[in-house]
Image (cartoon, rainbow, N blue to C red):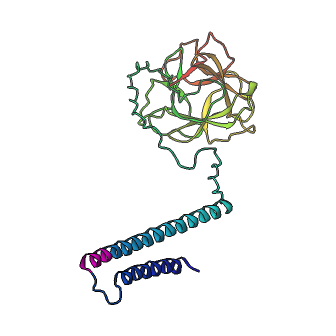
Amino acid sequence: MSDQEDVERQRRRRVSLANAFDRRAWQRGEKPKVPARILAGGVALVVVAAAVFGAGVLISYQQGRKDKERQQKAALNQRATPAVAVPAPSASPSGTSASPSRSPRREPVAAPRRTSATPRAKTKRAAKSRFPTGPKFSTTTGVLLRNVMTGLCADLPGAGKGQEQGRVEQGTCDRSTKDNQRWDLVVNQPGAGPGGADLFSIRNAKDGYCMDVWGTDPPEPSAQVTQWPCYPGATDNQMWYLERKASGRFWIRNHKGGLCLDVAGGTGAGGSGAQLTTFGCSLNDDHLWSFA
């Protein structure tokens, strides 16, 4: 039997009791009394109200009990169900937290002020001379051959071009292209001379002829130096080499025989127009030459 049927039975029972009480108050053949009827009606109302109130209380109690039982069953079911473990976030490979933290703000660092360095004193480099400074050198063009003792330069007669077998003499030094005193020292056989010296020919820059000694044999002492078409190499006697005697001062020696380029006449006595010759080398003679 359900709870509602039970409540309904109790309510009907109370109603039947009230009706029975009312019938008792009314005897057959008697006229009911007004106070008794009012009292009986009031009692019946009280009984009905009590029954309704009791039914409401009972229904509320039973409903609360059912709600409590349902909550207990839900709690038991929740305990019986295993909790699903939420995996913790895996650590990053670097071992740092997954959520990056903001790095602290870096305060600007003032750049160091540049101080002006003390200027270094400029080191003067020695100017590289285009003239030979030793027995080994590169081909040099347009130089003057100046005799140290006489102060005059290797020259050709006049100011124009020379000629085959024309004489080579000395004259007042003139670097201009109007004259014919500029010579090219053309290295033909590097390192082929005595002590590894370079062998070179002396070629006039204006006419293209080379300093030469008559014939092809080694020159004799006092042999005249003339001009001839250039034949570099060992077949002729046009090859020369330098022997350094002092800074910027050299003997100019013929490779065949080893004689020095010389000025004819007594020691230092040759003047302008004096013939150039070959002679045995001596520091006391006019055999030293420089380049200008």
Q: Position of residue 36 (x, y in %)?
A: 29, 76
Q: Main secondary structure of the magenta part?
A: helix
Q: Is residue 134 above or below residue 166?
A: above
In this picture, residue 221 sits left or right of residue 59: right
From the viewer's side, name the closer residue of 149 and 217: 149
Regarding residue 213, the answer to whether it shows in the image is no
Question: In which quarter of the view is residue 246 placed?
Answer: top right
Is 286 one of the magenta-colored residues?
Answer: no
Residue 59 visible: yes
Tell me where the magenta segment starts and ends, as one range: 33-41
Rendered location of residue 179, percent (x, y): 44, 34
Question: Where does the N terminus fall, quadrant-wise?
Answer: bottom right
**Which residue is located at x 64 percent, y 48 percent?**
91
Taking depth in this image into account, of 152 and 52 the one nearest to the observer is 52
Left or right relative to 237: residue 20: left
- Could you say where residue 2 lies in the image, as x and y percent from the top left? 56, 79
Which residue appears farthest toward the left when viewing the image?
A: 34
Q: Quadrant of residue 201?
A: top right
